[in-house]
Image (cartoon, rainbow, N blue to C red):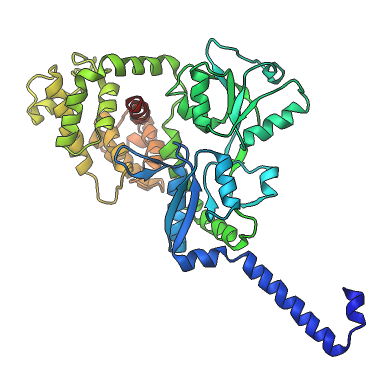
Amino acid sequence: MINYLFKLSLQQKFFVTILIGFSGLLGCSMGDSSLDAIKASGKLVVLTRNAPTTYFFDSNEQATGPEYDMVESFAASLGVRTEYKLFATTEEILEALEQGQGDLAAAGLTRTQDREKRFRFGPVYQEVAEQVVCRKNGKIPKNQAALAGLNIAVSGGTSYEESLRLLQASHPDLLWQADTALNTEQLLEKVWLKEIDCTVADANIVAINRRYFPELIVTFDLTKPRPLAWAVDADSGALQKAMKIWFKKFQSQGKMDQVIERYYEFIAKFDYVDTKAFQTAVRKKYPRFRPTFEEAANRYDLDPILLSAHGYQESRWNPRAKSPTGVRGMMMLTLPTAKSLGVKNRLDPYASIMGGAEYFSKLLRRFDDAVKNPDRTWLALAAYNVGRGHLHDAQKLARRLGKSPYVWSDLKEVLPLLSQKKYYKTLKYGYARGREPVRYVQRIRNYRDILEKELDK
């Protein structure tokens, strides 16, 4: 091109130079117009999948999920509404993104070298390891070499398939099935049903699903923690930049921590015995008390599944339960609380459930309007356990420490401090076993999640 220009007249050179420059600008504009187009249309089209780690509908039929919460915040920063398109697998999502069916893919996508050749990625919001998952009492590989000869399946087009291909270079006998019809959660269920020996899944997906399928076991990590990020078209540089600007603010305001707390932090270290005991109780005990929990929830405008999980945490659904401190019954009411609620017999399961629901609803209403859900619910549960006075002390201490008295992710860090003399001696209600309400809320959230899944079967 330089040699060719050298032979042209000055006027011709000027014309060609202008034409090349204009073409470059036009190409850049045409190739990076996605952000302008999104703002012009007033809509951000998001490609995702229906799963507890991405996007789903809760018991109130409201959209929720970690990806949903983040996307809604990002869309608000752009001043646009959202439209979600759901796909069954990661492969389908990435194909749809390449075909221009959406503006961004938000589906727990691992940023890999192969994918970076096809897409641009937003900032990393989480890092997770890929894990080999098999079934208790099944074929359990102790190391990577032992994977050879097993019936392994992974969802086609995922980063798991890429990881297995890399491993296959040093273990040529390793074979697997890439299933393009089933997603990771469905393959975990197939392992549980003994239809396949093992699969590969992200650690956060495994942690959630082991509570539904307790016989699943993690044999070893296949990879080190790897980054998760949103993906956009390779030409969407402006959109990528907008995501980075939004995420920096989102993270600095502690909102990313709140997302992690809301969807993952309540998942305690897996307890096989406790999970199996709960699933057994759901089948054998819960049908007897379910109508009462639902009636109480309807009367006091509560979530019936949460109220049921609350009852299990209190008494294991034992209407004659009794603690050394004197609280009794299904909802473990103290004698003064029972009297204030008009509960004459704490061992009557109907009266106890109704009384516990009424008391919990009163706790919910006593918080300042600045406390929003789901934080209001978690704070009310903590108050049910440790007492409203101690929770008020924790809120006061949170302010002193520069934390929010209205956000559970902050309060759960402050509550344990109530057992330390240097803190409790300055507070109105004094010493409290502050770790107990934190574990209490964590367990109820866990039971609620499992119960909802059990009732959907």
- Identify the residue at image location x=48%, y=68%: 40
Tell me residue 148's x, y (percent): 70, 18
Tell me residue 305's x, y (percent): 28, 30
Q: As rendered, which of 431 and 351 lies closer to the eye? A: 351
138 sits to left or right of 209: right
397 sits to left or right of 103: left
- Considering the image in quadrants, where does the N terminus appear? bottom right
- Identify the residue at image location x=48%, y=16%: 215
- Identify the residue at image location x=68%, y=32%: 163
| Quadrant in which residue 214 is drawn | top left
Eyeballing the image, is 247 above or below 92? below
Eyeballing the image, is 160 above or below 17? above
87 sits to left or right of 304: right
Regarding residue 176, the answer to whether it shows in the image is yes
Tell me residue 29's x, y (percent): 63, 70
Q: As rendered, which of 17 and 122 lies closer to the eye? A: 17
State the count of labels. Answer: 0
- Considering the image in quadrants, where does the C terminus appear? top left
Q: As rendered, which of 154 and 140 lies closer to the eye? A: 154
Eyeballing the image, is 286 above or below 86? above
- Identify the residue at image location x=71%, y=31%: 165
Regarding residue 386, the answer to whether it shows in the image is no
Tell me residue 203's x, y (percent): 55, 30
| Quadrant in which residue 91 is drawn | top right
